[in-house]
Amino acid sequence: MTTTATSITPATAPATAMTAAAAPARPRLTAAEYATLPETLLPTELIDGEIVEMPAPTLHHQRLAARIFKVIDQLKPDGEVYFAPADVHLDDRLVVQPDVLWVAADNTRCVNVEDKYFRGAPDLVVEILSPGTAFHDRVTKFALYEQHGTRELWLIDAAEGLIEVWSREEAAFRRVGLYGRQQTFTSPLFNQPVAGPALFGEATA
């Protein structure tokens, strides 16, 4: 994601009966209830039953996501590649929208439910970072992908031109490496080289 959800919590507010009392808590939703909400193209996720809404991604983010999609589509041996917004239900109160994801043809843990959403972890997830979403992507969603069985994770820092690759070893992610935009790395999942310039749309130095 390239933008972050906003939470409006004024630091100072008039001492009125309205503001003195705690606002009623928003009801927590299940993934099934979330799936019945009206369709939207804005990035929206369900984290521990709470809806997290975000503004639309920037044009730079969209161009980067499109190039990453094309690269993975050429690398994949089978299966399908998708890009956000595509809902991935990790459990009954967790729904995420990876920027780009790949599901292998033999992945029985990630099921296409009536062409509406996926249930279970994709094989590969790519998240495009921004200053506003770095914590959410690096900490919150990283832990979710690790916990639920994603096999490989790429964290793309668009501003710095960096690619951080993580690969699953048994029950945890292992950091494969950190690569610059002009470097080439080998994806353990595909066992093929991935050229940084192709991801970032640049000529090879």
Image (cartoon, rainbow, N blue to C red):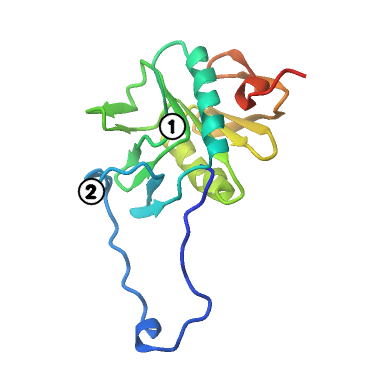
Picture coordinates of residue 121, whole percent (x, y): 39, 32
User: Please, which residue is most extreme toward the right here?
Assistant: 205
Image disc number at residue 191: none
Q: Which label's residue is closer to the chain start, 2 or 1? A: 2
Question: Is disc 2 placed on a helix, strand or loop?
Answer: helix
Q: Which kind of residue does numbered mark 2 sit on?
A: Glu
Question: Is disc 1 placed on a helix, strand or loop?
Answer: loop
Q: Residue at x 42, y 35 (%)?
A: 84
Position of 28 with respect to 160 (left or right) is: left
Disc 2, disc 1: CB below 8 Å?
A: no
Picture coordinates of residue 104, whole percent (x, y): 40, 18
Picture coordinates of residue 91, whole percent (x, y): 33, 42
In the image, 54 versus 126, the foreground residue is 54
The nearer-to-camera label among 2 and 1 is 2
Residue that numbered label 2 is attached to: 33
User: Please, which residue is most extreme toward the front here?
Assistant: 59
Quadrant of the rendered image containing residue 128: top right
Image disc number at residue 149: 1
Picture coordinates of residue 172, whole percent (x, y): 53, 34
